[in-house]
Image (cartoon, rainbow, N blue to C red):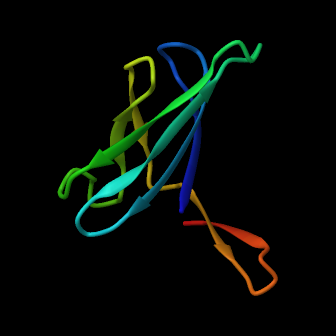
């Protein structure tokens, strides 16, 4: 699972974009929340093959509809034997 955090320039909310990438698709979810926590919602997304750039960047939409570019500099997590999550950055 890869994680990308950002702010949406459309609605001003904070975003957490969680996704997995394979040769055939990129799938995941966009979660957004406002600073005052009055907005807290999300949506699923799935993108077909050939959409990501050679570096791994792709575009998906915030819940408000604004396009968000997800760079290849996401954080990923692996669970070790003790079920701890080890975060790594590419």
From what the image shows, is residue 57 above or below residue 12? below
- Determine the residue positioned at 53% across, 13% down: 11
**Quadrant of the rendering where the C terminus is positioned:** bottom right
**Image quadrant of residue 60?**
top left
Residue 43 on image: x %, y %? 45, 33
Residue 7 on image: x %, y %? 58, 27
- Taking the image as shown, residue 19 lies to the left or right of residue 25, namely right
- Determine the residue positioned at 61% across, 20% down: 13
The foreground one among 82 and 89 is 82
Residue at the farthest left position = 50
- Determine the residue positioned at 33% across, 56% down: 26
Residue 2 on image: x %, y %? 53, 59
- Taking the image as shown, residue 30 lies to the left or right of residue 47, namely right
- Taking the image as shown, residue 71 lies to the left or right of residue 4, namely left
Residue at the farthest bottom position = 81
- Determine the residue positioned at 79% across, 73% down: 84
From what the image shows, is residue 43 above or below residue 83? above
From what the image shows, is residue 82 above or below residue 68? below
Disc tally is 0
From what the image shows, is residue 56 above or below residue 78? above
């Amino acid at each position: 699972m890869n994680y990308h955090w950002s702010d949406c320039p459309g609605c001003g909310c904070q975003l957490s974009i969680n996704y997995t990438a394979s040769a055939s698709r990129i799938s995941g979810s966009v979660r957004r929340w406002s600073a005052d926590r009055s907005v807290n919602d999300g949506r699923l997304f799935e993108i077909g093959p050939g959409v990501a750039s050679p570096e791994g960047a792709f575009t998906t939409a915030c819940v408000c509809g604004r396009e968000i570019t997800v760079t290849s500099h996401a954080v990923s997590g692996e669970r070790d034997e003790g079920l701890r999550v080890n975060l790594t950055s590419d």
